Structure formats: structure tokens, C-alpha cells
Image (spheres, grey):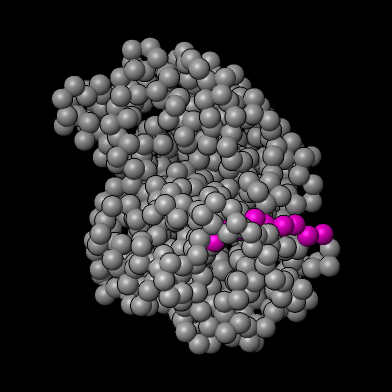
Amino acid sequence: MVVRRSMAGLASVTVLGLALAGCSGGSGGGDSATRSSGGGQSSTASSAGASGDAASGSAPAAPAGLAKFYDQQLKWTDCGEAKCADLTVPVDYAKPGGPTIKLAIDKVPATGHKKGSLVVNPGGPGGSGVDYAAAAASGYVVSKDVRSSYDVVGFDPRGVQRSAPITCYGDAQMDKYLAADPTPDDATEQQEAAAESRAFGKACVDKTGDLIKHVSTVEVAKDMDVLRAALGDGKLNYLGKSYGTFIGSTYADLFPKRVGRFVLDGVVPPDITGTQMGLGQAKGFEQATRSYVRDCVAQNNCPLGDNLDAGMTRIRKFLKQVDAKPLKVTGQGDVTRLTEGWATMGIAEAMYDKGSWPTLTDAFQAAFNGSGDKLMAMADQYAERDSDGSYSGNIMQVLNAVNCLDRGGSSNLATYRKDAKTFAKVAPTWGPMLAWGGLACGEWPVKATGKPERVTAKGSGPILVVGTTRDPATPYEWAQRLAKELDNGHLLTYDGDGHTAYKLGSSCVDGVVDDYLIDGKVPAKGKTC
């Protein structure tokens, strides 16, 4: 799985059948922020540290060779309720005199006395920060008080949507790719899965060119520091959700003295392996699904049965049935059948927001009666796909490009057969699919530039880490892990369901985060909402 977007204040989603991003140890270079090569982390930014107010500060000097990027002046134009501009960055930070790309950015201006800018990222890899920030104008993403204090700024990371977008397949090809079997049952199906991964990777390389080697999380973090400078802020204030926490922790480790107010909600830990991430997510999704089924069977007429174990068994039986005989769907462009791949995405869509559980129950009822339409509609939401077969974003295309640079995978099919059995012991519903997800990076044609690495952000200001106890995509233990590893991490626990916590219904969580963003107040140790 790969952590996805969190649009308009809704929960982030995780893309199925793919391995979650690990930490990038470095791709490109050219500035004075460095990482150690060992399991520990030694971080230094340029000698000119930020000073002044924690939310803004005076601007530090540009890293060597990058002055023309750090000194650029943004040209803002009106775009709806926001202001939009382009930010120029080098394709390769090791070669700042080489090719450049433009990143799309936007801001929703502060409504009151401005403390500075708050850069927001919804996750992914591949989520649009431009769309996410724009939603702040409608009351989503951040509270009214935070909106009063900050310009809310978003950017589409390199390779995403409006920023030199990676496009490997056309819409019809993407439909076939996403419909593929996420749990290959025998040697023939496993070889087919490997071939599909290879074909997709080749198409990405053929159509993207040199940029495909330079979309790592480290490079996105360096882009954020250029953005900070262009905004005129000495320190970066940041709200990252889901995969956005990985970007944020990477930035904090590269530039600890430039960390302002940092909120990392729904943590992706940079130091665990792809296998550990897959297993963690398998457990998380299993737990979330059990919570859903427990709720369903407590209602009248739950189509899954009358007890928890029966309900979980029914879901697994259903997925096997659609693997063998896909359900008919109508009004979905080239997609005429609900395969196991699509069905799994539809179920996953509901695991991130308890409010979607009734919709999933209706979809199961329709599916058990022979129609895959409702579950396919949920899969559409998951994949940013419209019912006419077009895709509104390119998140499904970007995922592998980023994740497989951040850490590689094995091409040995025996590895995944073994992992599928191991994962299934603790997560019989989700384990096999999560285990086989790693194959995408095992067959990726571009060599990984990163590896799992511990981050500490030594010397940074306080960083607020938010974890949800029954988060399916980023298990609570991951938030605990990062909060302990950070030199100045502070954990806020939300005892609840769904993925991420801020601005998702808990006034307690919202209040703690707002107090931190506005006044710099960190929660007491052990704070739980």
C-alpha cells in the first residue's frame, strides 16, 4: 500500500497493491544539508540558521550554487479564491545548472494578522497540494483561527498533476492496470503480475525521461526549502498528513534549524523497511475492517452476517468470488467488470472514514445481489477516477516512481510467496495483497536512491506528531516510533477510527493542534483525545 491524499479535510487513502514508501537516504545533492550513511542520523543545514519568531524567522542564506532558485520572486495571479504562481527548481540538485522544472503553487491568504505561511501536503505520493490548500478557502484543511494567522500554501510536488506530471499510461491502460489481480494465486499469475509491473515501469521511463530519476522524497523536501525561501519565510511552517509526514520528517532532518511549527499527522516512519511497512499496514487494515464489521453486525440486516468472525469470513469469500468471476458494472466507461483489484480499492476507500461505513454496507448488499456498481463507484473515488473512465489526477501513475526511488524491492517471487503466508497469519483479509504489493518496486527499472533511515532532526524546534489508535494505513505505533526518534518530538494520541485526525471531527485534536500552530504550545506528555 501507499499512503495517498487527504483532500478537503477528508481522510487520506492508501493505494492498494503497492509498497509504502520507505525513507530516502538521498537523491541528488548540491546543498549543505547532509545525511549520515549509517542507521543514525546527523543533520546540518547551511551555517546561516533561521532566527526570530518560531513561525517565521529571518531568511537563511541560500545553499551553495542554488541562489538563483532561492532568490526567485514569485509572480502571483488570481485563481478562484486563491493566488497561484510557479516555482522553478532544478531537476537534479547535484547539477543546479542543468534542466529545470516548474512547480505549481497556490496560497489562500490569511484572513487576519499574518504570522507567516503554512505549507500543507495531503499525502500520496501524488496528492495535489494545490487542490488541498485551495480547500482551505471553503473551511477545510485548517481551522478558522489558523486561517486567520497563516497564508495556507500548497504545491504539487515534482511529477504530480500540474508540476511536470508523470503520465505512464492512458486512461484505458490505467483501468486494466488497476483491475489486475492483487493476490496472484499460482506461478502463472505471479509471472503475469511481474510482467505487468515491468511493463508499467518501462512506460513510465519511456514517457517521462530524466525526471523519472529525480522524484524522490529527498528532492521534494529540498523543493520545499526553495519554496520557503521564495515565500520569504526564515522557517518553514508545515502541516503534513499521511505520506506528507514522510516529506516533513525528511525536511526536518535535512534542515532542522529551519523548522518552524511542524504538524505530522498519520505518520509514515522513514526508518522501517518495505516489508515492515507492508506488514504494519496489513495489521492496520485488518483492525480497521474488523471495527467496520463489528459496527455492521450490531445493526439490523447487516449483509455480512450476525457476528464478527462470520462477517470477516464473508468479505474474504466475496473477494475470492470476484477474483474467479468478476461482477457486472454499468456506466463506467471501458470498465464492465468489478474485479478483485477494483473491489479491494472500493472496500479500502471506506476504511479511512467511519462516515463511509454505511455506504460500504450498501455496496456489499448490492454486490451480493449481483451488481458491482456501488463498490466500483467507491473504487472510482479511491483512484481519482470519473465514471466516464477519465482520471482527475495522476496519483496512480506517480506512486511507483516516488516509492521505488525511496527504497527498492526484490524481484524474487519466492520472497513474496513467503511474505504472503507470513502476513496472512496476522491479517488474513489484507495480508496477501499487501505482501505482493512490494513486487512493483522489485520490477521497477530505475535504481533506488534511498533506503530506510532513522531521522532525529537534531536541533529543531518542537515537532507535533499526531497518531490515531485504529488508523488503517499508518498504524498508531508508527506515530509513537517517530515521536521517540525525533530529538524534539511531541506525541498527540487520538483514540479513534480512520486515517489522520486533525480537522476530522475531534474538537480535542483540533484544539491541541491549533494551540501549537498559533501559540507554539505543545501538549502535555501522554495527551490523548
In reply to whether residue 274 is colored magenta, the answer given is: no
Residue 390 appears in the picture as rendered: yes
Instruction: Tell me what residue is drawn at x 84 percent, y 67 percent.
Output: 97
**Is residue 4 found left or right of 142 in the rendered image?**
right
Number of numbered discs present? 0
**Residue 103: in magenta span:** yes
Closer to us: 427 or 340:
340
Above or below residue 165? Residue 301 is above
414 in relation to 35, above or below = above
Task: Identify the residue shown where x is 36% and y is 39%.
Answer: 351
Magenta region: 99-107
Can residue 475 be seen by looking at this rendering?
Answer: no
**Residue 147 image-quadrant placement:** bottom left
Q: Nearer the viewer, residue 366 or 69?
A: 69
In the rendered image, residue 419, in percent from the top left (x then y), is placed at: 49, 40
Say which residue appears at 34% left-offset and 56% top-offset: 503
Q: Position of residue 229 (x, y in %)?
A: 63, 74
Q: Which residue lies at the image location 63% right of the left edge and 87% below the top edge?
A: 48
Between residue 218 and residue 513, name the one nearer to us: 513
Q: Identify the image quadrant of residue 519.
A: bottom left
For the C terminus, which image quadrant? Answer: bottom left
**x, y percent for residue 200:** 68, 35
Magenta span: chief secondary structure: strand
Most extreme residue toward the right is 98
Q: Is residue 373 left or right of residue 205?
A: left
Say above or below: 146 vs 429. Answer: below
Judge from the rendering whether residue 57 lies leftward or rightward of residue 165; answer left or right: left
Residue 456, x across and y down, in percent: 49, 73
